[in-house]
Image (cartoon, rainbow, N blue to C red):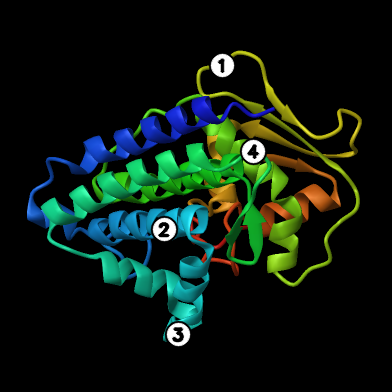
Amino acid sequence: MVDLTALLADLAAESEQLDALVAELPPAGWDRPTPAPGWTVAHQVAHLAWTDHVAHLAATDESAFFASVTSAPDPSRLVEDGAESFLAPPPALLARWRAGRSALADALADVPPGQKMPWYGTSMSPASMATARLMETWAHGEDVADALDVRRTPTARLRHVAHLGFRTLGHGFAAHGRAVPTAPVRVELTPPAGGDVWAFGPADAADRVTGPALDFCLLVTQRRHRADLALVATGPVADEWLDVAQAFAGPPGDKREPASGTPS
C-alpha cells in the first residue's frame, strides 16, 4: 500500500525546490519565456496554482469541481484559461500557490480511505492525485529551470514520475488515437544517484525500455524529444510507446522538437 504521508512529503519537497527557484526572482524573471510557447515563468506557476485549486475542489466539493468544468467558456482552452485566470503580481501569485498547495495536501490527507475523487476523464485516489501533482510540479519546474538557465539536480522523487509514466502506457496510445497494446513492456531505469535499477513490468517481457530515469521522466512528461535522450527501446510496442508516451491527462501535448533538428 502506498504511504500517502510520505508521498505528500515528497510532493511538498518538490514544490519547495521550485519555490526556491522563483521566490527571489525580480519581476523581469517572472516574465521570462519558457519552452512552452506563450508561457512565461509566471504562467507556469499560475498553472500549478490553478491545478492545485481545482484538485482541491475535486477532493472537497465535487459539485464545485464539475461546475468549474461545465462553466468553462471554451473547454478546449481549460488549462490555458485556468493559468491566465490565476496570473497576478509575483508576490500575490507566489502566496496563492503556497496557500493552495498546502490546502490541497491537507485535503488529500483527509479523503476517507477507499474514496476516489473526480478528475478530467477519470477518477483518482488521493495517492494518485498526489503523484500526478508531483509529476506536474517537477515537469513545470523543468520549464522554469530551462527559462532561468538553471540545471537542477535530479532526486529519488523521480521514481514517482517514472512509475506514473509506466502506468500511463495505455493512455499514451489511446490519447494519440492508437490501439492500446496488449503486449507487456518491461522498463528498467538507472536512478539519478545510482544504485538498484528501478524496474516496472514483467521481467520476461520481450518489449523493453532501458536508460536513465531522468531521461524517461523527461520523455513521459514531453519535456524532451526522444532523439535527445539515452533511452533504448527493444521491440515494436516499446519503440512506438516512446513516440506517444504521456504521463498527464488529456489530449496529446505539443511535443518538443529535437535539439539537433530533424530526428533520424
Question: Which residue shows up at 47% across the image and 41% down it?
Answer: 134
Quarter of the N terminus within the rendering: top right
Label ID, residue 185: none
Tell me the quadrant of the picture where the C terminus can be found.
bottom right
**Three-letter amino acid code of the residue under disc 1:** Gly
Q: Which of the marked residues, 2 or 4, is nearer the chain's N terminus?
A: 2
Amino acid carrying mark 2 in the image: Thr
Q: Nearer the viewer, residue 97 or 162?
A: 97
Where in the figure is residue 215, as x and y percent of width and height?
55, 39
Q: Secondary structure at mark 3?
A: loop
Q: Residues within 10 Å of mark 4 (few under 14, many from 20)?
A: few
Q: Nearer the viewer, mark 4 or mark 3?
A: 4
What residue is at 64 percent from the left and 50 percent from the top?
116
Q: Amino acid at mark 3?
A: Asp
Q: Nearer the viewer, residue 2 or 152?
A: 2
Residue drawn at x 49%, y 37% is 109
Residue 229 visible here? no
The quadrant where residue 40 appears: bottom left
Q: SS for tag 1?
A: loop
Q: Residues within 10 Å of mark 1 (few under 14, many from 20)?
A: few
Viewer-nearest residue: 233 or 138? 138
- Residue 250 % position (x, y): 59, 66
**Label 3 CA crowd tier, 10 Å (few <14, some 14–19, many 20+):** few
Residue 51: give its label.
2
Return the disc, 3 or 1, that comes first in the chain's sequence.
Answer: 3
Q: Label 2: few (<14), some or many (≥20) within 10 Å?
A: many
Residue named by callout 4:
113
Rounded to the nearest angstrom, the CA distance separating label 3 from label 1 is 46 Å
Residue under label 3: 74
Q: Earlier in the sequence, mark 2 or mark 3?
A: 2
Horizontal and vertical percent position of residue 28:
10, 56
The residue indicated by pointer 1 is 194
